[in-house]
Image (tube, helix red, strand yellow):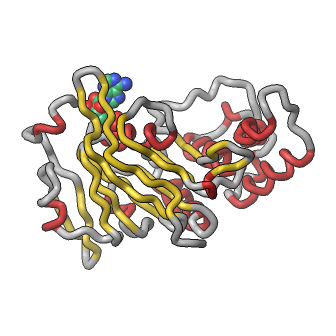
Amino acid sequence: MSHEILIKIRDLGVRYDSVQALEHANLDIYADDFIGVIGPNGAGKSTLVKAIMGIVDYSGTIEYSEELKRKGRINIGYLPQISSLDKAFPISVREVVMSGLQSERGFFGRYGKEERRRADTILEQASLSDLAKRPIGELSGGQLQRVMLCRAVVSEPKLLVLDEPTNFVDNRFENELYNLLHHLSERMAIVMVSHDIGTISSVVRSIVCVNRHIHRHDSNIITEEQLRNYDCPIQIISHGNIPHTVLGEHEHCPHCEHD
Ligand code: ADP
Ligand code: MG
């Protein structure tokens, strides 16, 4: 995979009424990136992701490379932050995954053999083949989250963006998810928002700190000093030899007073 820039973000600003969520933010995302985006609650992580996805108004510029386009449109796999999963919808696992190909088909297109084959291929890679015909209402939270991940990548985007994908899932699923992401990272760039830097630092290759501004660190380990230079109070802990970094309390942070 090349080291070419997929997305170039310059002087990005996002404002919601009285809240300046992002300001003067710059970031380059490369084709071979696996980035962990960290920062306290309300820091602007989801806002950054939404700006990249073009679903929030912003000032500044976000340039997308030709490589990201498919059939003239920007194709980015997106797994949004969820607070709960709506499982009542009577649709099968395979149908959910195929719906990730909708933009290629056009709204009135029908799914055919080719779409089923692509859905089944990605379900197999995620060890979910046995569930293909199952209604999504019968799945566990972890299984459903993996199905949504399959949906996000079935169109083989060059960039996958995940917003706190391990919320509401158990530890075993977390590891399965990271394994799957590791495989996917060989063929697409990944940007993953997480509040748990301790775990993700062993998964990602670079860390981006968001706190209204954006700081990129080209390493998956971030030092105490780097974190101290970053606007919010941060707490560091260690388990054995592995440095674990945890975002601490931040009541006194002027940037986080909107929580
Ligand atoms: P994070 O994902 O890092 O927790 P967000 O990007 O969701 O942070 O939010 C950044 C700031 O913008 C927070 O202060 C939040 O309250 C505010 N915010 C987010 N979405 C909205 C919205 N739709 N309307 C108003 N304020 C918002
Ligand atoms: Mg968020």
Q: Which quadrant contains ligand 1?
A: top left
Residue 173 rendering spot, x and y as whole percentages: 53, 54
Q: Residue furthest left?
A: 252
Position of residue 180 relative to residue 129, above or below, is below
Residue 246: image x %, image y %?
23, 57
Horizontal placement of 4 versus 21: left or right? right
Closer to the camera, 93 or 217? 217
- Residue under the image location 83 percent in, 26 percent down: 108
Is residue 60 in view?
Answer: yes
> Which of the image's four quarters has the C terminus?
top left
Q: Which residue extends farthest top?
A: 17
Quadrant of the rendering where the N terminus is positioned: bottom right
At x 25%, y 76%, the residue is 240
Q: At 54% across and 31% down in the image, what residue appears?
A: 85
Residue extending furthest bottom? Answer: 241
Q: Could you tell me residue 214's position as x and y percent? A: 28, 52
Q: Nearer the viewer, residue 245 or 37?
A: 37
Left or right placement of residue 80 versus residue 222 in this view: right
Write the residue at 18% across / 37% down: 256
Relative to 137, residue 225 above or below = below
In this rendering, the count of numbered labels is 0
Q: Nearer the viewer, residue 174 or 234?
A: 234
- The answer to whether one can see residue 39 in this image is no
In this image, 129 relative to 17: left or right?
Answer: right
Return the x and y of residue 188 as percentages of the image width and height: 60, 62
Answer with the quarter of the image where residue 228 lies: bottom left
Q: Quadrant of residue 45?
A: top left
